[in-house]
Structure formats: C-alpha cells, structure tokens
Amino acid sequence: MDRQQFQSCIEACNDCADACDFCAASCLQEQDVKAMARCIALDIDCAQMCRLAAGAMARGSEVADAICNTCAHLCELCADECAKHPMQHCRDCADACRRCAAECRRMSGAQASGTGAGAGSHAH
C-alpha cells in the first residue's frame, strides 16, 4: 500500500479531528451545555475515530478500509448533529465531517476493490 494514495484522506481525517475537538470545546462554553450533549459526545467519538483512521492509513494497516468505513459512518452522524445547531463552530465541524466522510468512503471503496471481499470479515 502506498501511503501517498491515502494522503488526502489522512489530511481530511486530521482536519476533521481538529474541527471536532474545537467544536466540543466550544459547545462546552455554550449557555445551554445540556442541549449540546449529543453534539459534544459525537464530536469526541468522531475525533478519536478520525485519528485512528489516519494512523491506520499511515501505517498501511490491513484493516484501514474497515476503519475508514466506520469513520465515514461516524462522521456522517456527527455532521448531521452539528448541522442542527446555528453556531459557526458546529457549521464548520459539519463541513469537515462531510469532507472526511466522503474521503473515507472513497478510500474504503478503493481498498475494498483492491483487497477482495474477505479482508474485513474475519471473526475474532
């Protein structure tokens, strides 16, 4: 696996993680923090998953495609939640999450077509 072919996805994951961290911290400063609870929780989960995905791609992990597929799903959930809020940090986070989801879907599709159907189906 050539790391360069995943560079745009790695960058999107890192940008998304940063946006999610900033959004979560900003949400904690909002007047009605309780109303932001789901947004904060998804921001934290999304940031961690994006970092995991970026690391997996950078290492050339054999499960990078599965991780990126999960990352895309979580980014979509986070984007949908952030889009419900009018604050600029939420809007910016939603945009970063959508970009990351698109990159991860592209990457996991490219990997899946190149590695065969059995790559992510092993039971543990």
Image (cartoon, rainbow, N blue to C red):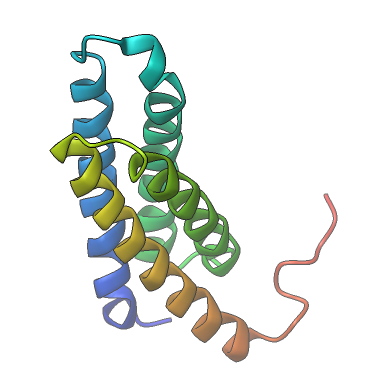
**In the orientation shown, which residue stands out farthest toward the left?**
88
Res 14 visible = no
Q: Would you place residue 43 above or below residue 10 in this image?
A: above
Q: Work out whether residue 67 or residue 94 is closer to the camera in this orientation and state it.
A: 94
Q: Quadrant of residue 36?
A: top left
- Seen at 37% across and 72% down, the residue is 103
Q: Quadrant of residue 101?
A: bottom left
Residue 23 location (% of width, % of height): 23, 32
- Seen at 36% across and 46% down, the residue is 51
Drawn side of residue 36 relative to residue 62, left or right: left
Q: Work out whether residue 69 or residue 83 is closer to the camera in this orientation and state it.
A: 83
Q: Would you place residue 14 above or below residue 27 in this image?
A: below
Residue 73 location (% of width, % of height): 54, 56
Drawn side of residue 117 relative to residue 42, left or right: right
Q: Work out whether residue 89 or residue 67 is closer to the camera in this orientation and state it.
A: 89
Q: Work out whether residue 70 or residue 118 is closer to the camera in this orientation and state it.
A: 70
Q: Would you place residue 97 above or below residue 63 in this image?
A: above
Residue 76 location (% of width, % of height): 46, 55
Q: Look at the image and tell me in which quarter the N terminus lies.
A: bottom left
- Seen at 22% across and 46% down, the residue is 91
Residue 19 location (% of width, % of height): 21, 43
Res 45 visible = yes
Drawn side of residue 106 relative to residue 113, left or right: left
**In the orientation shown, which residue stands out farthest toward the bottom?**
114
**In the orientation shown, which residue stands out farthest toward the right?**
123
Q: Would you place residue 46 above or below residue 8 in this image?
A: above
Number of callouts: 0
- Seen at 21% across and 53% down, the residue is 15
